[in-house]
Image (spheres, coloured by chain):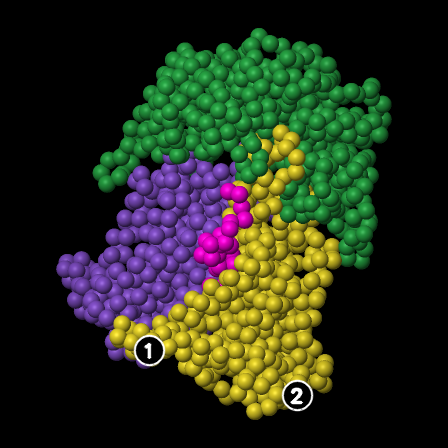
Amino acid sequence: MSTPDNEPGSEPGTEPGTEPGDTRTQESARPEPEHRDADRWGGVLREIASGRAMTAFLSVLLAVIVGSLLIAATDEAVRDASKYLFAAPGDFFSAAWDSIWGAYTALFRGSIYNTNGADFETKIRPLTETCKFAAPLIAAGLGVGLAFRASMFNIGGRGQMLMAGAAAGWVGYQFDLPWPLHLTLAVVAGMVAGALWGGLAGFLKARTGAHEVILTIMLNYVAFYLLFYALSEQSLLQAPGSLNPKSLPMKESAVMPKLLGDRYNLHLGFVLALVAVAVVWWILNRSALGFRIRAVGLNADAARAAGINVGRTYTTVMLIAGALVGLAGANQVLGTVTSGIGVDLDAGIGFDAITVALLGRSRPLGILGAGLLFGAFKAGGFAMQASQNIPVDIVLVVQSLIVLFIAAPPLIQAIFRLPAKEAK
Amino acid sequence: MSTDVSMPIEQTPIAGVTTIVDRKPAVIFGLATAGLALILLFAGVSDDTTFRLATPDDWAELPAVTVPAAPTAWLLVLICALCTAVSVSLLLKERRTPMVLVVVFAISWMIGFLTWAAAGASIPMVGLLAGSLALAVPLVFGALGGVLGERAGVVNIAIDGQLLAGAFAAAVVGSMTGVTWFGLVAAMAAGMLVALLLGLFAISYFVDQVIVGVVLNVLIIGLTSFMFSQVLAPNAESLNNPPRFDKIDIPVLGGIPLIGPILFRQTAVVYILYVVVALVTWALYRTRWGLRVRAVGEHPQAADTVGIKVNRTRYRTIILAGAIAGMGGAFYTLVSVPQFNREMTGGAGYIALAAVIFGKWDPIRATLAALLFGFASNLQGVLSVIGSPVPSQFMLMLPYVVTIFAVAGLVGRSRAPAADGVPYIKG
Amino acid sequence: MQLVLRGITKRFGTLVANDRISLTVESGEIHCLLGENGAGKSTLMNVLYGLYQADEGEIELDGVVQHFTGPGDAMAAGIGMVHQHFMLIPVFTVAENVMLGNESTGFAGSLDTQAARERVREISERFGFDVNPDAVVEDIPVGVQQRVEIIKALSRDAEVLIFDEPTAVLTPQETDELMEIMRQLKGAGKAIVFITHKLREVREVADKITVIRLGKVVGEADPKSSNAELASMMVGRPVELTVHKGPGNFGDEALVVEGLTVHDDLGRVHVDDVSFTIRRGEILAVAGVQGNGQTELTEALLGLQAHVRGSIRLDGSELVGRSVRRILEAGVGFIPEDRTTDGLVGGFTIAENMMLNRSHGEPFVSHGSLRLDELHEFASDKLKEYDVRAPGIATLASQLSGGNQQKLVVARELSRDLRLLVAAQPTRGVDVGSIEFIHKQIVAGRDAGVPVLVVSSELDEVVALADRIMVLYRGRVVGVVPSDTPREVLGLMMTGERPEGAVA
């Protein structure tokens, strides 16, 4: 447990003042949990941050193993073979191996390099698909991760994406403008809408002390029903004459251009996500705003006593976070599915973003890596579903297991019998 | 949080304490009354509204009440306005608005709204309320589980996962055995298993409870959806065809007009719910077990110093809570719908979580909140059937909006158990 | 009952908190455990109470070796503890708190609250406590809460009672009452362990004194020893109880506070119509028992309190209504009473903490981006100047000892251009070496012409630093008196009495 840097043993010197457990002020030097609200996420995040690359790798490995067992256990051929397990154990194991091998090669072929492709262009196509799926995960992951750094838990990705998608889509089909301007305007509209929806949660937290977890969860549903309503009204977003909750498709001038020609689906959204990574990195590590965000996240009381307006920081962080998640929403509507706004435009990305941010330890580059990994899972998952008939939901299972394992390094150490790093 | 919270406070000349009276009831009464009046002004109605109160098997048949919509609604607006006036005058005398007034206001407002919304049609009151209860059952189970966990200091965001796991297990075991009760027990076991996972990560490994909860929900959605597509769908007949609980008409009680058909012509699961609500409330406030659970949630260290095993108490409590939430899940597949479906709870666990907070961590209040949310969802259904002017999405949105108002302190500030969400680590 | 601790050793990682400590306590005896903050007293008692397990050594009661796996075992064996931070559940009633963990039950585990009430009344009457069993704990005064802790122990038939720094939160009057209660308990044949670092209290009630330093027993002392003798034993070298401070060179009135009233969100008034002034180059020390409005007063000066009325003028300009940031920019330095909560960001490096209250502009920020080179140079300089002992400026603040953390806060605050310094409990939980250093820095600030407000619950510190002393009681100013006012008079003033002639 605990952060290694809080270990009493690591304290320099043995002045009397360092003895743990004697007075209250020194409790902070003990491996105590963070008792104050402000530090609640902080402890976990630092724990995640201090987890070594080994733990991360083993977590992914373990999650993949569990996923394999699930695939094998539910495979028809394996179950048939298990009926005569003792008579022909070889059949059982080869059936199990076949199903797992089949699944993961399909995953690989779907996400990185399709060995069955006719030419190199076809073979490399899955990698571009991975990048396409990764783009919104990275953008939304940055939104969640940035909020984490201010010790705020932004579960509102879904709502922010829906509002952003609606705004971006509306601009995208409603107006007639020349190409770069129209697209820019639509993207900005989406980011602003996402920012406002996220900022609302931040503002309410700052003003009333309401917990952002509850606020953002509830705002997700409010956003969903608002969008649903708007898409059911001809006077609002619903396509004229349509009975489905769907808007008109995007105009050509508002669609994100394909990066590698029409053969590939990869579009400008990926570049925007990369830009977002750079911007967030700069904000967090080089800007005064980022300094304040981190100060508030690690110790809101000290930040307040040092003249930092904590409430305003919460609102600002959620505005930026909402804008980043909004970028993901715009990416979906203007890039990936340009046939019109739907109530499912978020495609689960709002929640996936949480796992991306956790796996990426809330650091921009970490989120980039985690986003690419989960993007690969998504791309490969659909390929796996198509070729091996394994439901894509297995990706959700593996993804959530990775995050659980990563968050509990002692569990990983216990499972793999690694030497515990702590003296305790 | 004390950042930037500023409210005007009246200062009396006596040193020591200044009195602050909560202005919120008066404000909310005023806004709600004005809102209803505006609706009537701008979307006036002229028809009659009929409230149907009877069902065939009652002892005595209540007559259907038919009233002219507009005058009745205006009369109820007047009553609401009166309540507001009383609340304001109490505020000026620095006194609290009593609960009775809140109840009178709420009922008047609701009937006034119904009268307007259903003008020109008739509302089956029994169906409306019984349907509300049916929708509320999983919410109440979930909320009770949530209350128990949080009272012991463990935030349970994974209620939704427990409901879903319960629904899944009930469907599979019910189908395999053909016995509803086995399905129910399996649902409880599934809820407990999720609770055990929550405990393992949140209590033993000190992982943040909200993170664990959110991730567990994703995990269970993934697992149940995967199993559904991979195993249940191809074998629907043998694995996803659970038996269903029958309605039991309780003699005498079931015949009471209005109340009987709503409360006492229900399935066994609902009767279990009544018992569970009563038991949880009694146990939490009147037993040694409850005292210890609350102590552990308020001040774990103090509990530890009097020899209470904090983490053991927490584990036991959340596992019990998991069993209760699991039963709520069983209601989906053994009562409501004939089979399991992917993500069939539709985020009901989050509404249950909202009910926990809106109910101020109290089992009775949380139950009432869950019933209110169930009512809102069902009213939406009924109104869309009889063709009402309110878009259904806004009715569905209600629980969430109400919860935002609740946590933002606009309807009275609620106080969570002090150590809620904080892992206990011994020195 | 006889309690014997033999060779108790407790380690945390590489740190030895208790090093082979042995101790014997008899019935009908008050045994004082004297030591500085952090000497290892509380750790030892937590071992005795079963909260920690000793790495070596054993605990014996009446000749029987005990193995406590938790507080439950210790209580069952007859050990009761009055914790420094009360182990009471604020939202429970007195009776519920007393019965918790020791409940008598009726049908199906239902609580027998009546029995618990009776028990509280009975013990309360026997010792003259005057405690209402149905009162909710968070609503009763601190002194009464402490009695609830004592009742809790007694209701479990404790024979050995441990009092862990029990007087920190009490008024001098309540302290006297507690001493009386301890004598009474001793008369009833209980063995009492009294942990403290306050010399006067020790000399008043102790039958035996054991002094602990750096986790080791350094010896026994006679209750008749002088303060200076006890102090030097406790600290390990002769201690200067006074601060070297030349005569003041006072200028104009820099800080003028008039009719300051502060209340919290619940409407409770913490600072009540307080007025005072501080001149340039003067230290005004605020004396008073903790919880009499000192915290709120200092926070109001910094703009950290939400509900403030009255006026605070610094060099003629009004501070009330300004944001914390504007007040800091007006030249107010702040050493908060709890450095780990309000003073430092534990997860930040030393360098980052150095710029914590200057994140809005020069010298460390320009056009919204950080100027890391300037910061690092500045931090390295200050690290040396203020004797903060750390491997480097990239060390995390949470890895520093209490004394070094406090020096870091002092360095940050004093290295700005100050027009007022507010120092709340500047040396709480700090080792003696750092105390002397910090005191010197504060006096240096004063000599440079900065007006200083010092708040301390240690009367010694107040007397040592002050040019004038202001005594607060229940949020009101009892009086402002010269620094040579006798301790007895100050003590009396801290209970709200205003003696003749004690006016300045």
Q: Is residue C152 above or below residue A115?
A: above
Is disc 2 placed on a helix, strand or loop? loop
Label 2: chain letter: A
Q: Give the extent of the magenta segment.
A: A401-424
User: What is the display colour for chain A?
Assistant: yellow
Residue drawn at (34%, 28%) of the image: C76
User: Chain drawn purple, letter?
Assistant: B
Residue type pointed to by label 1: Asp
Residue that sits furthest to the bottom in the current view: A118
Relative depth, front residue between C41 and A212: C41
Q: Residue C251 placed where, x, y %? A: 85, 26
Q: Residue C384 placed where, x, y %? A: 79, 38
Residue drawn at (59%, 39%) of the image: A9
Local packing at callout 1 (Cα closer than 10 Å; few below 14, some 14-19, many 20+) is: some
Residue drawn at (56%, 50%) of the image: A43
Residue drawn at (26%, 60%) of the image: B185
Residue C298 lies in the magenta-colored region: no
Q: CA distance from mark 2 to mark 1?
A: 47 Å
Circle nearer the viewer, 2 or 1: 1
State the residue position of label 2. A261
Viewer can see residue C387: yes
Residue A409 lies in the magenta-colored region: yes
Q: Is residue B190 above or below residue C258?
A: below
User: What is the display colour for chain C?
Assistant: green
Rendered image quadrant of residue C221: top right
Label 1: chain letter: A
Q: Is residue C371 above or below residue C384?
A: below
Relative depth, front residue between C117 and C320: C117
Q: Which mark is residue A91?
A: 1
